[in-house]
Image: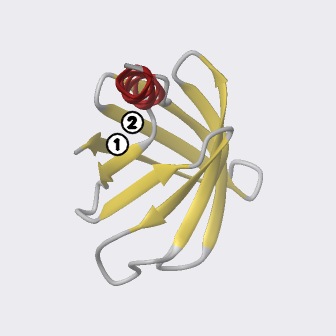
Amino acid sequence: MFRKMSLALAATLIMAGAAWADPIEGSWKTQSGETATIGGGGSFSITLKTGKYAGKTIGSLKATGDNKYAGNVTDPANDKTYSGKATLTGTTLKMSGCVLGGLICKSQTWHKL
């Protein structure tokens, strides 16, 4: 009886942990068609999983409010790092950032897989 209860409790805790995961965590289709993974907890790292730069960590984000994030993302093609923000709406992640004090800005929209 105790063993069955322990297994049930363990399964419940595992399922609850998945439910408590931040909605930004997971796999994303980038605007250019690659797949990126976002994960990590308090500070979320962004790693490319497919494409020419697969395996490269290209940034990190921190939560700043409900479905809002801020941090840095590096363009792997030219190694420019943009500081900016991201907003999650449903399964869409809209990111915008600037370099050189706002002289050069870029934005992208990613979709959750």
Image spot of residue 109 (x, y percent) = 34, 42
Give the residue at x 45% y 77%: 55
Per the model, the C-alpha gap separating discs 2 and 1 is 6 Å
With 25 as the anchor, is 28 left or right in this view?
left
* Crowd band around label 2 with a 10 angstrom C-alpha radius: few (<14), some (14–19), many (20+): many
Mark closer to the observer (2, 1): 2
Q: Nearer the viewer, residue 25 or 19?
A: 19
Residue drawn at (41%, 29%) of the image: 3
Colour setting = secondary structure
Circle 1 packing at 10 Å, graded few (<14), some (14-19), many (20+), is some
| x, y percent for residue 5 | 40, 19
Position of 31 compared to 79: left or right?
A: left
Query: In terms of image quadrants, where is residue 8?
Result: top left
On the question of residue 111 being in view, the answer is yes
Amino acid type shown at disc 2:
Leu
Q: Residue placed at 38% from the left, 78% from the top?
A: 54
The N terminus is located in which quarter? top left
The residue that mark 2 highlights is 93
Identity of the residue drawn at 48% across and 41% down? 95
Residues at discs 2 and 1 in contact (Cβ within 8 Å): yes
Query: What residue is pinned by disc 1?
Result: 109
The image quarter in which residue 82 lies:
bottom right
Which circle's residue, 2 or 1, is located before the other in the chain? 2
Amino acid type of the residue tagged 1 in the rendering = Thr
Q: Closest to the observer: 87 or 35?
A: 35
Q: Quadrant of the C terminus?
A: top left
User: From this viewpoint, which residue is outermost toward the bottom?
Assistant: 52
Q: Does 80 sit above or below residue 23?
A: below
